[in-house]
Amino acid sequence: MRAFSAVLPPRWTRFDLDRPVRDALGKVVESMLADVPPAARDRVRRYVFDGLLSSLNQLASSGVVTAFLPADNPAVAAAFPVFAVRPVDFTVGGEPIDPMDYLVGILGSGAATVIEPIGMVGVRRVTDRDTSKALTDAVAALPADMSEHLDAEAAARAGQAGRLSREIEYVIGVPETDDRWMAITASISVVRGEGSDELLEAVTSFADRWVETVQWVEDEDDHA
């Protein structure tokens, strides 16, 4: 997969996972926790930093080459989307297949629609799930002297209400090429409650628009 560019929304950070991310992640966590009282900030920072670093390392291990996430505190944010980009494996049973046949196979499996980013073709598939229990467990697992500083009221509301999660999978690329294809997973989590469905749809629309900003970086050889 060749290099690509995409619009970086305000207060978002792009992490290229083929290089160290600790310094960039440290700055993001500082921004996330700007409202945490200074007395608790060091310990909370370590907790959040370690969790996010572990998540980014897991993404890298699963083949993700680039991740995008906002500088919002995930413990209390009304919505927390993460975009992950990976190359597409155009093989079935170890045998290579044409990318267009691959798309047709996804469409044939159902619950997928055709999309047409500028200069590309692709498919889009949406999966919803309820992550209420996972969030409740995560809030309950926080040490008492930490959770009380992570906006306890907001965290408690989030834990009681639960969260709705949506995963949107996009496979996009340029026909008749083998290096201008990518798979994007947009993972969106919103606090369940009044207006949560509308918020989920709004963030979904944002993800759809963001995918349309992806552009492939031209090599010098392309103009030789």
Image (tube, rainbow, N blue to C red):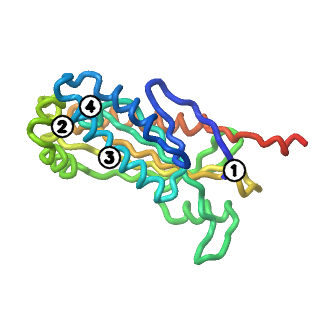
Return the residue at label 4: 195
Q: Please name the amino acid that badge 1 sits on.
A: Arg
Dot placed on the residue nearer the N-terminal end, 3 or 2: 2
- x and y, in percent, of residue 150 in the image: 18, 31
Measured in 3D between alpha carbons, the distance from the residue under mark 4 to the one under mark 1, in whole angstroms, is 38 Å
Return the residue at label 3: 165
Q: Please name the amino acid that badge 4 sits on.
A: Gly
Q: Residues within 10 Å of mark 1 (few under 14, many from 20)?
A: many
Image point 51% across, 53% down: which residue?
A: 64
Dot placed on the residue nearer the N-terminal end, 4 or 2: 2
Residue 105 placement, left or right of 45: right
Mark in the foreground, 1 or 3: 1
Dot placed on the residue nearer the N-terminal end, 4 or 1: 1
Dot placed on the residue nearer the N-terminal end, 2 or 1: 2
Q: Secondary structure at mark 2?
A: helix
Query: Which residue is more in the foreground, 16 or 78?
Result: 16
